[in-house]
Image (tube, rainbow, N blue to C red):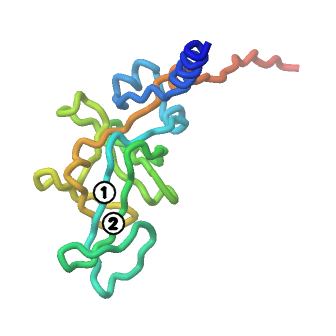
Amino acid sequence: MRLSILLIALALGFSSCKNLVPYSNNLRDQFNLNESQIRKIQFYVSSDIILQREMSSANTKIESGKIKMVNGRRVQEIIIPVGTKGVLTDMPRENKMLVSFEIDDNHYLSFGVNPNANNHYTLLASNWNGSIGTVTYAGEKYETNPESKFSQLLVDLRKIQNMETRQRVAKGRKVN
């Protein structure tokens, strides 16, 4: 009896789990998603993204994140943990998306198609120095942690499969 209750509980638990898969143009095309539908998709980040920037004494305004000392320097650090939910804020071009994981649409990171990652959408940087990227976040330049280089956007495949598109057919109009 206990075993059957445990099996039922496990089955219910696993059936409600997310089925997260990397987002790609192939996935977009497979489900024929347009920009307005993509805006309704919940995105998740595949690995921790840590943003750091050095703080000068004149630069004390902190909007988000925390300040800590690294090698005797004051550093602002923003952590976006694995699994953090994000929303599409803009699609400036076909293979690039701006995704916000906090506060408002001005706090976003750029993701784009990466041929080295099976054409999945990975974190974009204005410059990569080895595994350290330089990104702009809320108008400020930050450096990323090395693990961020292949951070991908993930989506819940089950929710995409269940997306409904409401439509109606116009019946026309007669002249009176």
Residue placed farthest to the left in the image? 130
Secondary structure at numbered mark 1 = strand
> Marks 1/2: CA distance?
7 Å
Instruction: Name the residue nearer the viewer: 39 or 144.
Output: 144
The percent coordinates of residue 151 (x first, y second) are 29, 43
Residue placed farthest to the right in the image? 176
The residue pinned by badge 2 equals: 77
Against 170, residue 84 (above or below) is below
Q: Amino acid at mark 1?
A: Ile
Image quadrant containing the C terminus: top right
**Quadrant in which residue 30 is drawn:** top left
The percent coordinates of residue 76 (x first, y second) are 33, 71
Q: Determine the residue positioned at 51% across, 39% down.
A: 39
Residue placed farthest to the front in the image? 1
Secondary structure at numbered mark 2 = strand
Q: Residues within 10 Å of mark 1 (few under 14, many from 20)?
A: some
Instruction: Name the residue nearer the viewer: 107 or 22.
Output: 22
Against 44, residue 9 (above or below) is above
Q: Determine the residue positioned at 22% across, 59% down.
A: 134
Q: Amino acid at mark 2?
A: Glu
Q: Which mark, by number, is residue 50?
A: 1
Q: Determine the residue positioned at 46% across, 60% down.
A: 106
Q: Determine the residue positioned at 45% across, 26% down.
A: 19
**Which label's residue is closer to the chain start, 1 or 2?**
1
Are the two marked residues, 1 and 2, in contact with CB atoms closer than 8 angstroms?
yes
**Quadrant in which residue 172 is drawn:** top right
Image quadrant containing the N terminus: top right
Q: Which mark, by number, is residue 22?
A: none
Tell me if 166 is positioned left or right of 124 in this view.
right
Residue placed farthest to the bottom in the image? 58
